[in-house]
Image (spheres, grey):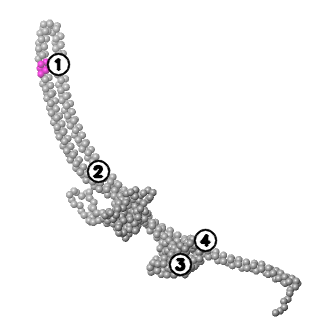
């Protein structure tokens, strides 16, 4: 072993000087090396930034171009649909306005013609009767005036003769006074006797004239009585004729009014149907439902009770009615008793095909049926009635919503009357016997169908779907191996009903600590995609003959896909 050599102070100082020189030399070489490294890093970062900017610009341009093309295609499709639907809606509105105008004009014309004809007939009969009574009254008054005039004329002539005689007698008496009193007295006596004879004769003449006047008055009275009897007979005949004409007119107008009532009833039904074409949903609200609707006891023979709504019109159909059935519990439980104790049925007229939804509260079922008018169609048990009652108001809402309806109306072919054809001659055949079928179609789900098609077109342009799962640290305790958390169904790449299935603790057979990811696909499609969990990406490719799920059992370790904010990004 060599002998140790002890260092002196000078050796230590020399070593310290050399160390200081080496440190100074190293410190001098570090700044240029750092500067050179910084320059190289800055150049690399600049190149990377340029590359990223170019890629971002290219991706933005492609995205803008794709969005523009999608918007143009969607706008063009919506405009085409609007152009196709607008003429149909305008034609339907115009036809409805024309039908309403024709029906209103026809009804007003019929009522006006019937009233004018009845008023004109009564006015003519009243005028004729008034004219005959006026003529009869004028004739009677003319006969009375003539008789009165003749009597007054005879009386005036007699008075003139008497006044002339008295005037002559006075003149002769004045002459005889001068001749002598005796002669005057004698003459006066003779004159008195002669005058008495004249008076007696005048009285007899007056009596004869008076008798003739009374006789003429009696004859005139008999004539007036006969005229009144004739007038009464004429009036009675006129009344009988008026009664016969009125009965015939009433019978004729009664038949016409019955025909008009039938037409008005048909028009009311047609107007009610047209009025309710736009009605889509009808709600039947039952008040005090907890007191009024109760199930039968177990001792009752019937299995259920039924309640019926008022009849209503909807979507161009009339006479619809809802039936609510409430079932009682049975000793031997029915196969669908656990589904509920209430069902709902719809009654409809014959020949109508409906696609509809039946509601009890907020629960509903969709169905389609062609009705025969004899039996209803509805749901099975699907809700418990007590769960659908509004506890605040104690009422129950039972509804029907018409999605689409198709009804066939039959109209007989009738030959219109020919106004120029004489009565009693059969009209020539101008139409064949048969029926005209009118197909009435109402579609209340057109918007939903168009929206579904637009959504489907949008889904064809969807390339990436992301699903963000919160509180990742709590997933494995909550979802052990074999249990999955599912996303909502979505549409992408033109496919409907896709769904993501994520197993935080892995599917059956997965390695401990690994998670699994599957995608549910419909049948008849071939898929090729990338499945992503956080930063982990896996390719997947498969053809589906039947609906099923495909993915990776050992996708990655669970901790590798958890992000810093305690979330997991699942994407396809």
State how far apart marks 1 and 4 are (Cα): 153 Å
Q: Residue at x 36, y 56 (%)?
A: 101
Q: Position of residue 293 (x, y in %)?
A: 37, 59
Under tag 2, what secondary structure?
helix
The answer to which of marks 1 and 2 sits earlier in the sequence is: 2
**In terms of image quadrants, where is residue 396?**
bottom left
Residue occupied by mark 1: 162
Q: Which mark is residue 506?
A: 3
Give the extent of the magenta segment: 199-204
- Crowd rating for badge 2 (residues with CA inside 10 Å; few <14, some 14–19, many 20+): some
Q: Secondary structure at mark 1?
A: helix
- The answer to whether the residues at label 3 and label 2 have Cβ atoms under 8 Å apart is no
Report the Cα–Cα distance between label 3 and label 2.
89 Å
| Mark 2, residue position | 114
| Residue 301, quarter of the rendered image | bottom left
Question: Seen in the image, is 45 located left or right of residue 95?
Answer: right
- Horizontally, residue 520 falls left or right of residue 313, namely right
> Of helix, strand and loop, which one carries label 3?
loop
């Amino acid at each position: 072993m060599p002998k140790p050599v002890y260092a002196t102070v000078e050796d230590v100082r020399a070593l310290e000087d050399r160390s200081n020189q080496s440190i100074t030399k190293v410190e001098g070489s570090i700044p240029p090396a750092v500067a050179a490294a910084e320059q190289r890093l800055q150049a690399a970062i600049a190149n990377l930034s340029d590359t990223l900017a170019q890629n971002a610009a290219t991706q933005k341009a492609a995205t803008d171009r794709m969005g523009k093309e999608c918007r143009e295609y969607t706008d063009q499709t919506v405009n085409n649909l609007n152009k196709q639907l607008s003429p149909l809606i305008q034609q339907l509105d115009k036809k409805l306005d024309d039908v309403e105008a024709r029906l209103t004009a026809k009804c007003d014309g019929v009522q006006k013609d019937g009233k004018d004809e009845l008023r004109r007939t009564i006015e003519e009969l009243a005028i004729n009767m008034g004219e005959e009574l006026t003529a009869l009254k004028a004739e009677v008054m003319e006969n009375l005036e003539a008789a009165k005039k003749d009597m007054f004329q005879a009386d005036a002539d007699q008075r003139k003769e008497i006044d002339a005689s008295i005037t002559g007698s006075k003149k002769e008496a004045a002459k005889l006074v001068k001749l002598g009193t005796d002669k005057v007295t004698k003459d006066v006596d003779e004159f008195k006797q002669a005058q008495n004879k004249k008076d007696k004769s005048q009285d007899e003449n007056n009596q004869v004239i008076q008798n003739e006047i009374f006789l003429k008055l009696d004859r005139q009275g008999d004539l007036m009585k006969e005229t009144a009897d004739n007038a009464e007979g004429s009036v009675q005949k006129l009344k009988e004729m008026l009664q016969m004409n009125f009965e015939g007119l009433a019978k004729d107008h009664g038949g016409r009014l019955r025909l008009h009532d039938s037409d008005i009833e048909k028009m009311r039904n047609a107007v009610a149907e047209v009025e309710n074409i736009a009605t889509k949903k009808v709600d039947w609200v039952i008040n005090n439902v907890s007191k009024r609707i109760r199930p039968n006891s177990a001792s009752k023979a019937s299995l259920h009770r039924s309640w019926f709504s008022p009849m209503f019109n909807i979507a161009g159909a009339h006479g619809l009615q809802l039936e609510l059935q409430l079932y009682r519990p049975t000793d031997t439980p029915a196969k669908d008793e656990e589904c509920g104790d209430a069902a709902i049925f719809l009654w409809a007229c014959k020949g109508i095909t409906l696609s509809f939804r039946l509601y009890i509260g907020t629960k509903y079922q969709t169905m389609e049926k062609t009705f025969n008018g004899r039996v209803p169609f509805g749901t099975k048990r699907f809700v418990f009635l007590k769960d659908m009652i509004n506890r605040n108001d104690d009422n129950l809402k039972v509804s029907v919503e018409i999605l689409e309806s198709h009804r066939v109306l039959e109209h007989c072919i009738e030959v219109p009357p020919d106004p120029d054809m004489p009565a009693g001659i059969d009209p020539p055949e101008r139409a064949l016997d048969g029926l005209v079928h009118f197909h009435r179609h109402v579609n209340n789900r057109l918007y939903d169908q168009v929206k579904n098609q637009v959504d489907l077109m949008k889904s064809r342009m969807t390339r990436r779907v992301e699903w963000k799962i919160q509180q990742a640290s709590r997933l494995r305790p909550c979802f052990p191996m074999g249990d999955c958390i599912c996303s909502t169904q979505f549409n992408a790449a033109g496919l409907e009903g896709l769904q993501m299935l994520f197993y935080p603790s892995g599917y059956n057979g997965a390695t401990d600590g690994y998670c699994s990811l599957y995608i549910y696909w419909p049948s008849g499609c071939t898929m090729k995609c990338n499945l992503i969990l956080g930063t982990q990406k896996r390719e997947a490719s498969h053809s589906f003959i039947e609906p099923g799920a495909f993915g990776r059992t050992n996708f990655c370790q669970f901790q590798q896909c958890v992000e810093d904010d305690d979330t997991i990004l699942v994407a396809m």
